Amino acid sequence: VANKTRHIQLVQDSIITGIASVVESRDNSTGGHINRTSAVVKIFAKKIRETSQINLSEEFLENIIKVAPMHDLGKISIDDHILRKPGKLDEEEFDIIKTHAAKSAELVKEILEDVEEDHFVTVATNVARHHHERWDGTGYPDSLKGDEIPFEARIMAVADVYDALVSKRCYKEAMSFEEASKIML
């Protein structure tokens, strides 16, 4: 039973990553983003386990790792002329891109509709919807502030921002770890 359960979990994880990779393949500027952000989330979870300053369950940390690839699924609904634009987005285009977070949460809920683990679905939805919220309340889609932002979304946000800073994009060069660290701190 344990082997079958592990196998089913591996298949589910592969499907989630596969769906996310299909979405990512439409976006010229973020190649490998899903794998890199997922790796950063794993590193975060490992550090949290090691430091034990934050009391989070193993299940919670594993759920964040599993759902990380789904954080940008809503980009599937963004028109190619915006998603694949080879330069910086104008204000109207950026407003459209910002809708991907809410759309990601809707898709995650749909995909996980029959999953019985409510906690997993909540973590997945929070990560998808709130990974662009900012501590000062200037993020999107809900302008959440500080502790209003679910912890799992904060972890995803740090991984997402880090990757955006240290990766070359069509509209910017990659930053060094030191530069990215200064900005994030």
Image: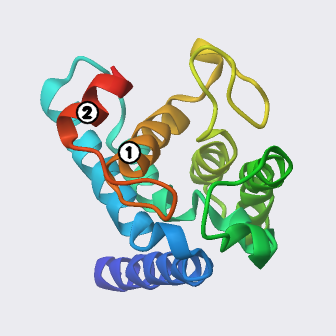
- Whether pointer 1 and pointer 2 mark residues with C-beta atoms closer than 8 Å, the reply is yes
Residue type, label 1? Leu
State the residue at coordinates (51%, 84%).
Answer: 18
Could you say whether the residue bearing mark 2 is in a helix, strand or loop? helix
Q: Position of residue 42 (x, y in %)?
A: 28, 52
Is residue 108 or residue 115 the one in the foreground?
108
Q: Is residue 112 visible?
A: no
Q: Is residue 57 left or right of residue 19?
A: left
Q: Quarter-wise, where is residue 65 in the image? A: bottom left
Q: Quadrant of the N terminus?
A: bottom left
- The residue pinned by badge 1 equals 165
State the residue at coordinates (37%, 26%).
Answer: 184
Q: Is residue 32 above or below residue 183?
A: below
Q: Is residue 26 above or below residue 60?
A: below
Residue type, label 2? Glu
- The residue pinned by badge 2 equals 179
Q: Is residue 68 visible?
A: yes
Q: Is residue 116 left or right of residue 35?
A: right
State the residue at coordinates (58%, 57%).
Answer: 71
Is residue 18 or residue 85 the one in the foreground?
85
